[in-house]
Image (cartoon, rainbow, N blue to C red):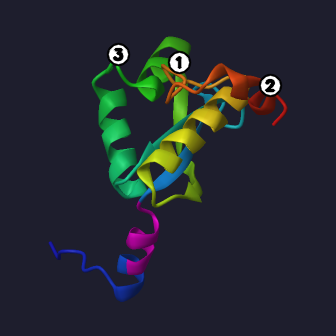
Amino acid sequence: MTKKHNTENDKKQNQFNKNVLTFVHFSSLSNSLSFCSMVYIGETRRTLDKRLKEHQYAVKRHDEKNGIAVHAWNSNHKVNWLEAKVKERVENYTRRRITEAVVIQSLPSTSNLDNGLELNPTWQPIIASL
């Protein structure tokens, strides 16, 4: 068995996929073309690939502290791992947390177990208008 060697391009892509805000989508298990309106928003300083592997492990072990796993098991939906996307790359941790909270709170439905960083209520009218 040969070990996969990272090319220079792979290394650059992995570096680019760090410090990101991600979207993960779901589809029905009975029909993979039937998409669920639920989406998971997450921020991580790790690469997207590494974070997705952590979520996949959480789904396998029915982790009740993981929003993706909870939605997948409670609704019998399949996680559409291939459609996971980097929404935005944000180096600064605080800005990344704020961005995550704003996106979560601006969407009608997410599988996140919380709203992310607690934002001052005076921001709610602005977030609601997004």
Q: Residue shown at 31%/21% (left/top)?
A: 63
Q: Nearer the viewer, mark 2 or mark 1?
A: 2
First in sequence: mark 2 vs mark 1: 1
Do callouts 2 and 1 mark residues in contact (Cβ within 8 Å)?
Answer: no
Density class for disc 3 (Cα within 10 Å; few <14, some 14-19, many ≥20) is some
Residue 125 is labelled as 2
Name the residue type under label 2.
Pro
What whole-number distance in Å separates the C-alpha atoms at marks 2 and 3?
Answer: 32 Å
Bounds of the magenta segment: 12-18
Q: Residue 20: image x %, image y %?
A: 49, 55
Of the pair 97 and 123, the residue shown nearer to us: 123
Name the residue type under label 1.
Asn
Q: Which residue is mark 3?
A: 64
Q: Residue shown at 71%/24% (left/top)?
A: 122
Density class for disc 2 (Cα within 10 Å; few <14, some 14-19, many ≥20) is few
Q: Residue 48: image x %, image y %?
A: 42, 55
Name the residue type under label 3.
Glu
Residue 69, picture quadrant: top left
